[in-house]
Image: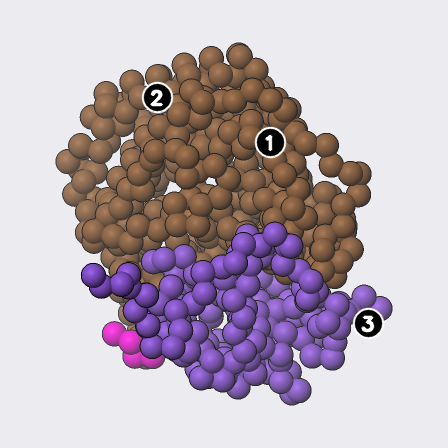
Chain colours: A purple, B brown
Amino acid sequence: MSDNSILITDLLSLPATVDEVDYARRGYHLDVALTADRVRAMAETLLRHEFYLVFASAVDLAPDAEVVYQFARHGSPCRIMARAYVRRDGTVPTIADIYHGANWHERETKDMFGIRFAGHPYLQPLLLPEENAELKPLKKSEKSIKLPADVRWLPEEPAPAAPAAPAAPKAGGDTPTTPEQG
Amino acid sequence: MTPEAAKQDKHTFVLNMGPQHPSTHGVMRVILEMDGEHILEPEPVLGYGHRIQEKMGEARPWPGFMPNTSRMDYLSAMIYNHGYVSLIERMTGIEVPRRAEFIRVITDELNRIQSHLLWLGAFLLDLGAFTPIMYTFDDREQILDILEDVTGSRLTYCYHRVGGVARDIDEKFVERTRAFIARLRSRFKPIYYDLVTSNIIFIKRVKDVVSFTPELARRYGLTGPPLRSTGISYDIRKNEPYSIYPEFDFEVPVGTKGDCLEVYNIRVAEMEQSLRIIEQALDRLPEGPFRNKIPRKVKLPQGDATFSVETARGELTYYLVSDGSDVPYRLKIRVPSFSNLSVLQELCRNMLLSDLVMSLGTLDLVIPEIDR
């Protein structure tokens, strides 16, 4: 756990908002939200912490679509969902030169959502045969598109009987109270 | 020679491999910039089998996507079933009877073994050895027969259900599976080991070809046996255990230097470990219901969740975003072969063409899974 507290501090200083969430319910440990401009810094931080990229993709929302990244670690389990809204000009900085595997994930996201990854070395269609500005198959229609608030967990999410989690070690590691010295 | 310099050189040429080619194991194309027998730049071209599975997942209530799950990686269909139902169970909190968990694990592991057996035969076929595939297909048929009896299909299963499995297994299934375990065990040594693993021609051919490293694996999100060949012991069944895997005693085989031979050895060792898991599960198979009753229409709670399982090829992750209805708002499917293939460009630069064929075989690709 002390491992994660350094990680969380690093992520907070990006800056980003970091929430520790219920793994049993969601399947990931940390929910990270940040601005598109900080995506590259996040990737560098996570690579330094020896995370690998599970996938990069997007969720179409109104008014701005959102890119989502999932990272995990080979060591002690820690899965991260990171999300950033696409900038108004429809771009997000690429992370393909940091995580080389992101190259194809970003190309696929461009195919499906039309999101452009600024600085990508080769942003050509990957799964779809050719560039087609009208055909962005995973974009939602105007009728069915949702607001971010419609797809987030509601606040009363944690199950009622959640046992008190062991509090994260805080404030300079006080030694536990020792029995009276005889 | 850099690709730029190569373009100036009159001795370089472009070679097209696929989309119809026996060693791409599916409809995939690789454009190869060649200098004689050496590859300067391999470029995979994908999408020939693209069916937009994710859109299908977002266009109907969640139960309607069940049959699709088995049509991506047709060799790990059962495990794809498992990942999807577990994701829905995670979001809705639907419980699974204990017997069903055992049945799921048994069928998953049978599925994994038949995938590895097919790979073993096909990989050696790529190398020019024709005989082994005859033996592996003989063994594999036994699994398909066993699974056909209980699921009704031989390849594209739709057997796992949210809250359990579709049909219960009977004594006959248990008996046949036990017989199969004994049979496959008796064949490892005389056939697979003596014929292939210890064969000096085979060893010399595959040893030290390709080199997966932990660092490469992290940058590309490599998973499955190629990742484990680098010495990283990472198997979702152990590292983020799901279902009842923690109750079983099994090992995760790893390598040290990440070449083709080690990946081969890992897959063979994994078959033995899967047999161990199945045996333990059969011994402890509890009585009880195989499926919980669930309401006809179950809405997903608003929010997002993810679920990862270990397929025969590596990490499969479903990521679902829900708006509170029973139709997923967004369903992302992260498939192992997609990330595993993306290393090809870096891995195979300056390699011999015949070694590229072997690298593709070592990655154990299923193309419809990559294209989805």
- Given residues B75 and B223, the one toward you in this image is B223
Of B315 and B14, nearer the camera is B315
Chain to which mark 3 belongs:
A
The residue tagged 3 is: A142
Q: Mark 1 lies on which chain?
A: B
Q: Where is residue B226 in the image (x, y as percent from the top left)?
A: 33, 51
In the image: residue B244, left or right of residue A113: left
Q: Position of residue B64 (x, y in %)?
A: 73, 43
Q: Distance between the residues labelled 1 and 3?
A: 42 Å
Packing grade of label 2 (10 A; few <14, some 14-19, many >=20) is some
Q: Which residue is drawn at 28% across and 24% down?
A: B188
Q: Mark 2 points at which residue?
A: B184
- Residue drawn at x 45%, y 22% as measured from the top left: B284
- Residue B36: tell me if it is visible: no
Q: What element carries label 2?
A: helix
Using the rendered image, report if marks 2 and 3 lie on a common chain: no
**Percent of width and height locating residue B176:** 47, 14
Q: How far apart are marks 2 and 3 (CA)?
A: 56 Å
Q: Is the magenta stretch mostly helix, strand or loop?
A: helix
Q: Answer with mark 1 or mark 2, whichever residue precedes in sequence.
A: 1
Quadrant where the C terminus of chain A is found in the figure: bottom left
Residue A26 or B270: which is nearer the viewer? A26
Asked where in the image residue B364 lies, by quadrant, the reply is top left
Kind of residue at disc 2: Leu
